[in-house]
């Protein structure tokens, strides 16, 4: 059964870089069939797509976050990563990782999702 | 940038039909997905490719997408369906989510 699990610091200081890991079990991220994405959600608010990475390292980013985001992957560890630089209190969110099919295709839905991890930006 | 608009809230009586809309420019030319999120839980897909149900999604969930509007319909709504619902589509390789609709079953 495919499972995704986010991990990383729950507290990050303003102006620093937020770094999260998504560990995938039950499937290989080396598959050309799927993409691996990050989504965030402010507590009590809606979902915002951050970006995604393909097995070959190709990345897709939300234009509103592109200047601060880096998504990468390590196929040997079956993990993919999120880095968000120059964080502020506005980046305090629950961060989810999820698998999806090719963007803009009939397979572009997100499933499954990780359980999410709350990251608070505070000094 | 592309936007998807949902009503903030929808109320329905148990056993009745709930409809949640999602509006976006030429949304019918894209594929829409719907996610259910209960408090403290991760989102779960209930409809993909406009109108397909994944394994485990109850038959009472259905979807449509035409023109500028996608619609999630829940027939015979049950108390367990009370949750937040989000639509999602892709625009130029960017995933877009609607603002979410809180479904209240009362």
Image (spheres, rainbow, N blue to C red):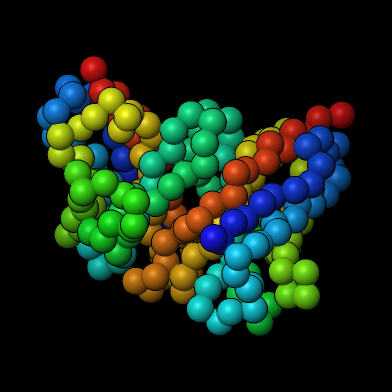
> Extreme top residue here?
B106
x and y percentages locating residue A56 in the rendered image: 66, 82
x and y percentages locating residue A18 in the rendered image: 79, 48
In the displayed structure, would residue A20 be above or below residue A31? above
How many numbered marks, from 0 up?
0
x and y percentages locating residue A111 in the rendered image: 47, 58
Q: From the viewer's side, name the closer residue of A47 and B4.
A: A47
Q: Residue at x 64, y 78 (%)?
A: A30
Q: Is B17 positioned to the left or the right of A68 in the image?
A: left
Q: In which quadrant of the rendered view does residue A117 lie?
A: top right
Q: Residue at x 71, y 64 (%)?
A: A80
In the displayed structure, would residue B62 be above or below residue A99? above
Q: Is A75 positioned to the left or the right of A112 in the image?
A: right
Q: From the viewer's side, name the closer residue of B31 and A15.
A: B31
Q: From the viewer's side, name the closer residue of B15 and A121.
A: B15
Q: Is A6 positioned to the left or the right of B8 in the image?
A: right
x and y percentages locating residue B37 in the rendered image: 43, 38
Q: Residue at x 73, y 75 (%)?
A: A75
Q: Is residue A96 visible?
A: yes
Q: From the viewer's side, name the closer residue of B71 and B4.
A: B71
Q: In which quadrant of the rendered view does residue A43 lie?
A: top right
Q: Residue at x 48, y 38 (%)?
A: A46
Q: Is residue B27 visible?
A: no
């Amino acid at each position: 059964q495919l499972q995704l699990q986010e991990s990383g610091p729950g507290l990050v200081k303003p102006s620093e870089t937020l770094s999260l890991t998504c560990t995938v079990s039950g499937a290989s991220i080396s598959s050309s069939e799927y993409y691996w994405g990050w989504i965030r959600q402010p507590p009590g608010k809606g979902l915002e797509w951050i970006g995604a990475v393909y097995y070959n390292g190709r990345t897709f980013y939300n234009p509103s976050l592109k200047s601060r985001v880096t998504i990468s992957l390590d196929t040997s560890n079956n993990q993919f990563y999120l880095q968000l630089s120059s964080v502020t209190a506005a980046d305090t969110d629950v961060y989810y990782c999820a698998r999806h099919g090719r963007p803009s295709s009939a397979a572009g839905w997100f499933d499954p999702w990780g359980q999410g991890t709350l990251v608070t930006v505070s000094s | 940038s592309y936007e998807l608009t949902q009503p903030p809230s929808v109320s329905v009586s148990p056993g009745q039909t709930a409809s949640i809309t999602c509006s976006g420019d030429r949304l019918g030319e894209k594929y829409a997905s719907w996610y259910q999120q209960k408090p403290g839980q991760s989102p779960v897909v209930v409809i993909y490719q406009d109108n397909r149900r994944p394994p485990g999604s109850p038959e009472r969930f259905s979807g449509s997408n035409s023109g500028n509007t996608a619609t999630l319909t829940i027939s015979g709504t049950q108390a367990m369906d009370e949750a937040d619902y989000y639509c999602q589509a892709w625009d130029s390789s960017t995933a877009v989510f609607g603002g979410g609709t809180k479904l209240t079953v009362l």
